[in-house]
Amino acid sequence: MRLFSLVLVCSLLFHSRVIAQIASPNGSPSATNRGRLPGRNAPTPNGSASKLSPEEQKARVAEAVADLKERIATATDKIMSRIINQEKDLRIRFSYFQKPERLNPNSFGSKEEIQPWIKLTDELQQSRDLSAKLYGNASEDLERELIAQRIAPPIADGVRREIISSFPWDEIAKKNELFNTYIIDHRQLLDFFDQNWATWKTEKPYFSEAKAESNYQKLCGEITSTGKQIEDLYKKINIAPAGEAPATAPPTPKSPEPPSR
């Protein structure tokens, strides 16, 4: 994702408007506060930055740029860490439903095992919704964090605009839409298993009744297709790889066995 590239941050830092404010003794708060750093407490002769040699001016700008870069990184990391952690949670929960056994009615040893998975679809929806909320609030949250880092509002606004514009918004919106469809279809499949309990066979085709088999195949096809699209989007935007399991792990189904009749 382009957002994580230091090239973006560096290009902002060396923008002429930013440099002009950093170099000015009365410009950005960063430049003003540098005088309080160890080794820089002595006032500039005659209080004028123009008395500095070119080398000293260059050193002052480099120091202020490094400080500003660190502050931008700190603010950005706070926002992105929330988004990345939530994306990891969402992606891990998604991976549970991507397993082939989730489409196999024989993976449930009893009818009671269906309900915990219905609850997990609710948790998957909650994770998806929180992810969407973090993206939706990213611009406002980032500006607040930049200001909290004592970055001048004009610079903070420019940094915020550049970073937020680097988000793959079309792909993010598509991902949210696909997750809604994916979750709805999984809920329908679980309801289908519940309503048709003890009517399937151990081998394919699972349902002897033509309409039931058709409905089952349709749901499985939609789930498989949507899941593939979500996986492809994750590969494209490279937001966050799947990592550790979330706090709430799914129930472990019993070994596949014919349903009780």
Image: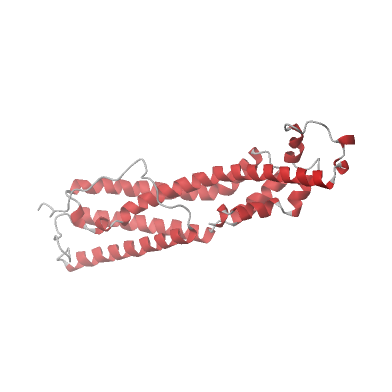
- Please give the name of the residue rendered at 62% of the width and 55% of the height, measured from the top-left corner: 7
Q: Quadrant of residue 153?
A: top right
Position of 131 compared to 75: left or right?
A: left
Q: How is the image coloured?
A: secondary structure
Q: Is residue 112 in sight in this rendering?
A: yes
Q: Tell me the quarter of the picture where residue 99 sits.
A: bottom left
Question: Does residue 225 appear to the left or right of 237 in the view shown?
Answer: left
Q: What residue is shown at x 32% (from left), y 58% (from top)?
A: 185
Q: Position of residue 164 (x, y in %)?
A: 59, 53
* Residue 195 can be seen in this image: no
Residue sitting at the far front = 55
Which residue is drawn at the image coordinates 34% and 56% (left, top)?
A: 184
Q: Position of residue 62 (x, y in %)?
A: 73, 46
Looking at the image, residue 55 lies above or below residue 212: above
Instruction: Give the residue at x 73% y 31%.
Output: 38
Specify whether 241 is left or right of 80: left
**Furthest-right residue in this view:** 46
Residue 121, percent across and down?
33, 50
Q: Residue 174 placed where, x, y %?
A: 46, 60
Frontmost residue, 9 versus 135? 9
Q: Nearer the viewer, residue 176 or 102?
A: 102
Viewer-proximal residue, 58 or 107? 58
Number of on-image labels: 0
